[in-house]
Image (cartoon, rainbow, N blue to C red):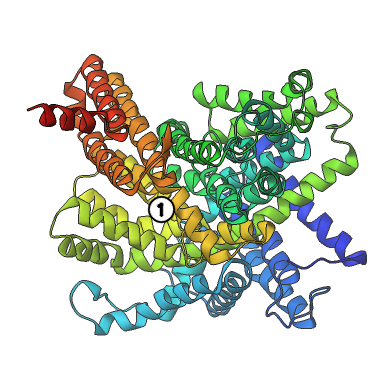
């Protein structure tokens, strides 16, 4: 993003703040009709994309070029047309009434400008992907089998992309972005403006910093807490990693591992309720499942993800005898209690969501509460200058999301109108032979490939349109199917070769990006395992009897502990290769056991405790060679 200065910097700042004010106005007084709400969003945000993001590496970094100004002005015209002629467009019959010449011209302009913005602001790979889907519309009539589709004329294709409100640039995805997502982005910026993120870091330092290798534990806890308000992996990493990575290096962790901890922890913030990634709101809209239900279902998997990271860090700290944080670097409990009022807006948000209020109204109340409570301290007070900065930051944070949803809307248009989604679902079913596990692995690979270098939201949207029908055809319920795709769309940001969050962490730590990416993905290994578990066993997403959820949680806790010990080569003491292999075998067996929903549900809690306790005892004695020694002694006596 360009760092502007002078009058243009002020104009851009005011323009960005205005779009945030528009979202707040509609949140309080009611949203406009779909085309107007979405048109205003793109009218404000598309020009910002051209002015703030250079076209190439050689483009001016301090100010936009003349071409950027021309494109910025041109990008406002199609949105303005949609706003002005909203009434006439509402009265037309989709796919029946003719498309006028001016609408075709403006539609082509809109498509090309959005493509260019996707290339600049998001990633070139997504722009190429959209282009491939558009090209498929012309190629499909000449293909056979599941890839065949009836021809679509240019006017009708432009109508689908430009004039429709169910899919396309101004479709439902843009509707979600310009309402639910935008208001939560603003809430996140308000919390950051009142130093709530700093409070999370201080709180994490106090509760986790005193143990061995406390800095890494602080990173895990702080990133998880910050993720409850951020929902963006890179933003989470920079907010917490800029403090925790140098701290971990100071305490004795290798730069590569310090960066990996920060990256894995920050990525997991998008799993963490109550404010997950923007894709969670899209999921709610697509599935019709209330957002609060999704947040509750995601809670236990997110907790186990962080427990896994925390245990890895703890075992390494014990193994290498790493020091805790200096008491002087940690805030006092008195200070934390004094600042705890910063959490009240989050508490209000959770209470309202749990009480049945919509995410939109709940978040609006939380924003108002954040503003009012900020005046309890001079440090957090949202003065007019600070408030302007918060609104400006909110508008700028919406640019990528809006462009992403506009681009993804075109992909969904092609998939829906050509039937490509069902065709790909058929291919997945054929390649998997009708078996669930191979199908899940194929969908996992697709999610990660789609998400390479791409934000979570478009990766989730594109993959779920392809993967959800295949998973539903195999008997998987809607919520676990969508959560499965959601997890791997997020983990794509952590997985090489384009692990963007890990590479950002490596730049802070001064470590090798490639090695850091693999270390981070290995550190977040439970994130790759848990989605398979909740597809087979929905108890972990709190569907079914509570005792089944408790039993599954106990088993998974043991899996996390044993796997962490095997990876770190430490469990009570240093392990050899044979013992580590044994731990991996036991943890793999318990993973398979945790997937047996009916079996776990049929056992009482007492039986589960006996089984898991037995596994712990066997593991402990196996590691300490006591059983082997006893066997050898008895054999010698005989």
| Residue 614 rendering spot, x and y as whole percentages | 24, 23
Q: Secondary structure at mark 1?
A: helix
Which quarter of the rendered picture does the C terminus lie within? Answer: top left
Between 636 and 413, the one nearer to me in the picture: 636
Which residue lies at the image location 65% right of the left edge and 33% below the top edge?
A: 324
Q: Is residue 169 among what the camera can see? A: no
Q: Is residue 566 among what the camera can see? A: yes
619 to 247, vertically: above or below:
above
Between 284 and 570, the one nearer to me in the picture: 570
Which residue lies at the image location 78% right of the left edge and 35% below the top edge?
A: 194
> Going by the image, does 589 lie left or right of 319?
left
Residue at the farthest top position:
606
Which residue lies at the image location 40% right of the left edge and 65% below the top edge?
A: 449
Residue at the farthest front position:
637
| Residue 244 rendering spot, x and y as whole percentages | 67, 44
Between 234 and 382, the one nearer to me in the picture: 234
Residue 511: quadrant of the picture: bottom right
| Residue 274 rendering spot, x and y as whole percentages | 54, 33
Which quarter of the rendered picture does the N terminus lie within? Answer: bottom right
| Residue 33 rendering spot, x and y as whole percentages | 58, 49
Residue 174: quadrant of the picture: bottom right
Which residue lies at the image location 30% right of the left edge and 58% below the top edge?
A: 443
> Going by the image, does 576 lie left or right of 386?
left
Instruction: Tell me the residue that label 1 is attached to.
Output: 488
> Going by the image, does 475 lie left or right of 532?
left
320 to 16, vertically: above or below:
above
- What crowding class fits label 1: few (fewer than 14 Cα within 10 Å), some (14-19), or many (20 or more)? many
577 to 399, vertically: above or below:
above
């Amino acid at each position: 993003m360009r760092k502007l200065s002078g009058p243009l910097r002020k104009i851009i700042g005011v323009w960005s703040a205005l779009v945030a004010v528009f979202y707040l106005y509609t949140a309080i007084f009611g949203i406009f009709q779909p085309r107007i709400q979405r048109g205003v969003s793109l009218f404000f945000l598309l020009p910002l994309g051209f002015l703030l993001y250079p076209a190439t590496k050689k483009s001016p970094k301090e100010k936009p070029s003349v071409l950027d100004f021309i494109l910025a002005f041109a990008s406002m015209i199609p949105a303005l047309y949609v706003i002005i002629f909203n009434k006439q467009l509402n009265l037309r019959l989709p796919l029946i009434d003719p498309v006028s010449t001016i609408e075709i011209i403006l539609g082509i302009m809109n498509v090309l400008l959005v493509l260019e913005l996707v290339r600049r602001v998001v990633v070139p790979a997504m722009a190429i992907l959209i282009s491939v889907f558009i090209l498929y519309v012309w190629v499909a009539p000449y293909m056979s089998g599941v890839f065949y589709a009836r021809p679509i004329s240019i006017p009708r294709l432009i109508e689908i992309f430009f004039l429709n409100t169910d899919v396309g640039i101004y479709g439902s995805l843009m509707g979600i972005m310009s309402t639910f997502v935008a208001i939560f982005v603003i809430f996140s910026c308000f919390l950051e403006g009142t130093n709530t993120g700093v409070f999370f870091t201080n709180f994490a330092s106090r509760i986790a910093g005193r143990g061995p290798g406390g800095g890494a534990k602080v990173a895990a806890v702080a990133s998880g807490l910050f993720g409850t308000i951020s929902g963006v992996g890179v933003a989470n990493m920079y907010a917490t990693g800029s403090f925790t990575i140098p701290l971990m290096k100071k305490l004795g962790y290798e730069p590569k591992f310090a960066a990996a901890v920060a990256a894995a922890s920050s990525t997991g913030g998008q799993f963490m309720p109550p404010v997950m990634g923007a894709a969670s709101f899209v999921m709610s809209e697509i599935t019709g499942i209330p957002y609060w239900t999704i947040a509750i279902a995601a809670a236990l998997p997110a907790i186990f993800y962080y427990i896994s990271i925390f245990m890895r860090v703890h075992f390494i700290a014990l193994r290498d005898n790493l020091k805790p944080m200096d008491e002087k670097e940690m805030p006092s409990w008195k200070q934390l209690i004094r600042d705890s009022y910063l959490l009240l807006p989050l508490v209000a948000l959770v209470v309202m969501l749990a009480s049945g209020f919509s995410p939109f109204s709940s978040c609006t109340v939380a924003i108002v509460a954040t503003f009012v409570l900020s005046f309890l301290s001079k440090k957090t007070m949202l003065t007019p200058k600070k408030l302007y900065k918060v609104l400006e930051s909110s508008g700028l944070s919406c640019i990528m999301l809006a462009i992403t949803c506009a681009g993804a809307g075109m992909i969904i248009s092609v998939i829906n109108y050509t039937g490509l989604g069902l065709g790909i679902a058929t291919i997945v079913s054929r390649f998997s032979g009708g078996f669930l596990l191979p199908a899940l692995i194929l969908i996992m690979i697709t999610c990660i490939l789609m998400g390479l270098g791409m934000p979570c939201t478009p990766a989730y949207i594109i993959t779920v349109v392809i993967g959800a029908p295949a998973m539903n055809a195999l008997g998987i319920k809607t919520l676990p199917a969508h959560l499965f795709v959601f997890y791997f769309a997020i983990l794509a940001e952590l997985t090489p070769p384009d692990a963007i969050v890990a590479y950002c962490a490596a730049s802070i730590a001064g470590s090798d990006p490639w090695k850091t990416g693999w270390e981070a993905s290995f550190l977040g290994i439970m994130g790759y395992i848990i989605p398979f578990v909740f597809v087979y066993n929905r108890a972990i997403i709190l569907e079914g009897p509570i005792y089944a959820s408790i039993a599954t949680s106990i088993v998974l806790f043991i899996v996390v502990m044993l796997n962490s010990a095997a990876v770190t080569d430490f469990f009570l003491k240093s392990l050899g290769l044979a013992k580590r292999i044994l731990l991996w075998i036991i943890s793999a067996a318990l993973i398979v056991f945790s997937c047996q929903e009916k079996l776990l549900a049929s056992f009482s809690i007492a039986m589960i405790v006996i089984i898991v306790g037995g596994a712990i005892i066997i593991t402990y004695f196996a590691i300490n060679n006591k059983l082997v020694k006893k066997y050898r002694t008895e054999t010698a006596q005989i």
